[in-house]
Image (cartoon, grey):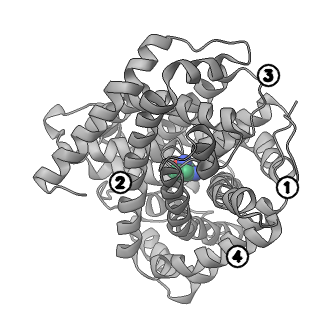
Amino acid sequence: MAGQQGGDRGGFGSRIGFVLAAAGSAIGLGNVWRFPYTAGQHGGAAFVVIYLVCVAAICVPVLFAELAIGRASRKNPVGAFASLAPGSWWPAVGGLGVLTGFAILAFYSVVAGWTLGYLGRALLGTFADPLTHEQSVALFERIEGAGIIPVLLTAGFLLLTALVVRGGVEAGIERAAKILMPVFFVLLVAMAIRAMTLEGSAAGLAFFLKPDLSKIDGGVFMGALGQAFFSLSLGMGAMITYGSYLSRGDRMPGAAISVALADTVIAVLAGLIIFPTIFAAGGDPQAGPGLVFVVLPSIFGKLPAGFLFAIAFYSLLVIAALTSTVSLLEVVVSYFVDERGWRRERATWLVTFACFLLAVPSALSGNFLDWQSILFGNYALTIGAMLICVFVGWRWGIPAAVEEIGRGGAPMPLAPLWGLIIRWIAPVAIAGVLIYIVATGNYM
Ligand code: TRP
């Protein structure tokens, strides 16, 4: 059962509700959109190898750290640091997180708006027959590059997000995530199977799975690390906030590992759809943020009941994106509710409106979007995660965190190794990558 919380805060109804909501936060456009295009830009399989290493060695430990901070303090990121380290400057790290979440929401909702546009197209039957690559590119330009349309789609998506967040954690977030994530998974598996049996798809599979280790450079490390934090919703306090809604009696380790596994499986599945399909269709895997949107339309017409399949797929992608935008908005809103004493309703609408204003330039310019995605999606999250490690390792303390993690009855697995990673390995590795990037000037 959820812990007791006062007033407007709310809590999760159950542990499985928490797992699905946290997985809902993690699984989203980061897996289906950002992971494939980032992998495509950074050499494919070599990137995937580094990505998996980052997830296992750095991100999963950071996930535990964030959940522990959240559950120990039962607060939003700013309040969490303030209550675990009173009178220090640590709450500023939470503040950086809240700002980062706000900025991520602003570009993320633009991309989420594109998915709404594609859902509209699916309903109109555009994907009943396979589109050629050229038709697909033209369609993307009509949705993404048409001035007012992406702005309206962004606004529509932010509105949906606000409506869920306004409803509070249990009624809104948990209920939506519970039913829909498993359905999404089944659809992705079907698409991956179809993609891998397309003529000419083998080269795509090799690009995605056969690493050419000579392609690894600082940019690959930075891209993979940033993407891993992004995909697991780490580095800005989303998991602190969700941890704060996890009851003291619930076993945390299994929950955390399930979330990380589910997220990683979905990202790999997305790669197994995108790369075989793009190689079969003759497109460029380095196309950048438009990659996935251009690639997918060519596959629906080749699936049974392609028309319905496309509708189902884009509906679920919209919902996957929504459970992620909800977690981003939730962090910012919970800050204003907890720390500033605003009512949830008022906080939700004001933050959403401000976010829309920041989203407009991204909706109008792909370059601005790309730049925001790198700055906040890679750098701010990576720096945030490093500071979270330093906080848990050196200020709050490993023993206190390990105790908090084990509170529900399942102890932290490999606690000494975890302590070593949080105190030394993760912060030093992250700092090393950042320093290397600055020294080589290889920022993207
Ligand atoms: N992880 C989500 C995705 O992959 C995006 C997201 C939601 C996020 N909340 C976050 C990213 C917090 C970073 C931080 O789509």
Mark before the other along the chain sequence, 1 or 4: 1
| Identity, as a three-letter code, of the amino acid under mark 2 | Tyr
Q: Residue at x 70, y 76 (%)?
A: 350
Q: Please tell me the numbered disc located at residue 249.
A: 3
- Residue reaching furthest bottom? 148
Give yes or no for contact between labels 2 and 4 (Cβ–Cβ under 8 Å).
no
Q: How far apart are marks 2 and 4 (CA)?
A: 26 Å
Label 2: few (<14), some (14–19) or many (≥20) C-alpha neighbours in 10 Å: many
What is the secondary structure assignment of the residue under circle 1?
A: loop
Give the residue at mark 2.
Answer: 379
Q: How far apart are marks 1 and 3 (CA)?
A: 22 Å
Label 3: few (<14), some (14–19) or many (≥20) C-alpha neighbours in 10 Å: some
Q: Position of residue 431 (x, y in %)?
A: 26, 40
| Identity, as a three-letter code, of the amino acid under mark 4 | Leu
Mark before the other along the chain sequence, 2 or 4: 4
Q: Distance between the residues labelled 4 and 3?
A: 35 Å
Q: Please tell me the numbered disc located at residue 350.
A: 4
Q: Residue 108 or 191: which is nearer the viewer?
A: 108
Label 4: few (<14), some (14–19) or many (≥20) C-alpha neighbours in 10 Å: few
